[in-house]
Image (cartoon, grey):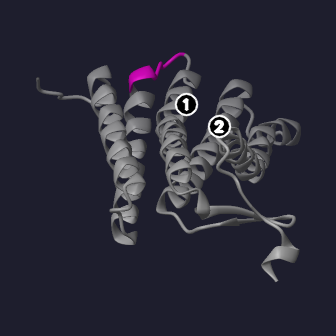
C-alpha cells in the first residue's frame, strides 16, 4: 500500500506501530539487561523522530481550514501521545525488572536508594517530553480558540496548561516510585536497611 500524502490516517497508524515496536524492543532489552547507553539513546531518538512525524501527520490529517484548532489538537495528541504511552509501557518493564532484582531499590532510613537503569532514564525522558509537549500544545489550542495572541489575560490563560505540565513532571517520579515500592511491599520483596544495622 503506497502512502502518498501526509493527510492520510494510514501513515499515522504506521508511525504509531513503529513507536510501539521500538519501545517494546527497548523494554525487552532493558529488562533482560542487554541494553547499553548508546542503544538506549538510539531507541529514544527513533521514538522521538517518529513522535514528531506522527504529530505532523495527525495534525495535517485533522486540519480544517475553518476550524484550525483541530489541526493543533491533532499535532498535540500525535506528538505527546507516543511519548506518554512509551513512558507508561517502560514502567511495566521497569516494575518487572525491580521485582526480578529487588536489591536495585532499597529503603535506607528516610532515603530511597535506586540503582542505575536505562529503563528508568527512558521513562523519565519520555514522560518529560510527553507532558511538556502536551502542555505547550494545550497552550497553542487555547490561543487558537481565543484568536488573540496579544491579550495578556488570554496569554496567562494559555500558560496554565504549561504550568500544570511542569507540575506533573515534578510530581511524576514521586508517584511512580510510590507505585514501585507498593508493588515490592505487596510481593514481600522490599529491601529495607536499618541505619543502625548498616554501621
| Sequence-first tag of 1 and 2 | 1
Please rate how many residues cluster around mark 1, counting C-alpha atoms within 10 Å: few if below 14, some from 14 to 19, many from 20: many
Label 1, label 2: how far apart the Cα atoms are: 7 Å
In front here: 143 or 3?
Answer: 3
Give the x, y percent position of residue 106.
70, 63
Secondary structure type for disc 2: helix
Q: What residue lies at 49% left-to-right and 56% top-to-bottom?
A: 119
Q: What residue lies at 75% left-to-right and 38% top-to-bottom?
A: 161
64 part of magenta stretch? yes
Chief secondary structure of the magenta portion:
loop
Res 72 label: 1
Q: Is residue 18 left or right of residue 77?
A: left
Please rate how many residues cluster around mark 2, counting C-alpha atoms within 10 Å: few if below 14, some from 14 to 19, many from 20: some
Q: What residue lies at 52% left-to-right and 63% top-to-bottom?
A: 117
- The residue segment tinted magenta is 61-66
Q: What residue is disc 2 on?
A: 140
Give the x, y percent position of residue 52.
42, 45
**Residue ranking furthest to the bottom:** 199
Amino acid at each position: 500500500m503506497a502512502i502518498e500524502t501526509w493527510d492520510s490516517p494510514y501513515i499515522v497508524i504506521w508511525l504509531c506501530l513503529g513507536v510501539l515496536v521500538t519501545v517494546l524492543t527497548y523494554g525487552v532489552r532493558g529488562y533482560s539487561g542487554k541494553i547499553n547507553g548508546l542503544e538506549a539513546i538510539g531507541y529514544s531518538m527513533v521514538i522521538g523522530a517518529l513522535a514528531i512525524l506522527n504529530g505532523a501527520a495527525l495534525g495535517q490529517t485533522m486540519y480544517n481550514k475553518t476550524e484550525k484548532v483541530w489541526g493543533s489538537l491533532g499535532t498535540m495528541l500525535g506528538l505527546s501521545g507516543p511519548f506518554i504511552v512509551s513512558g507508561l509501557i517502560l514502567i511495566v518493564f521497569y516494575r518487572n525488572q525491580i521485582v526480578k532484582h529487588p536489591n536495585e531499590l532499597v529503603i535506607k532510613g528516610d532515603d530511597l536508594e535506586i540503582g542505575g537503569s536505562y529503563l528508568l532514564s527512558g521513562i523519565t525522558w519520555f514522560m518529560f517530553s510527553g507532558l511538556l509537549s502536551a502542555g505547550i500544545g494545550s497552550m497553542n489550542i487555547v490561543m487558537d480558540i481565543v484568536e488573540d495572541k496579544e491579550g495578556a489575560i488570554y496569554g496567562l490563560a494559555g500558560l496554565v496548561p504549561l504550568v500544570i505540565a511542569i507540575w506533573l513532571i515534578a510530581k511524576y517520579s514521586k508517584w511512580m516510585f510510590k507505585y514501585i515500592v507498593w508493588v515490592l511491599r505487596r510481593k514481600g520483596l522490599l529491601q529495607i536497611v536499618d541505619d543502625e544495622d548498616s554501621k
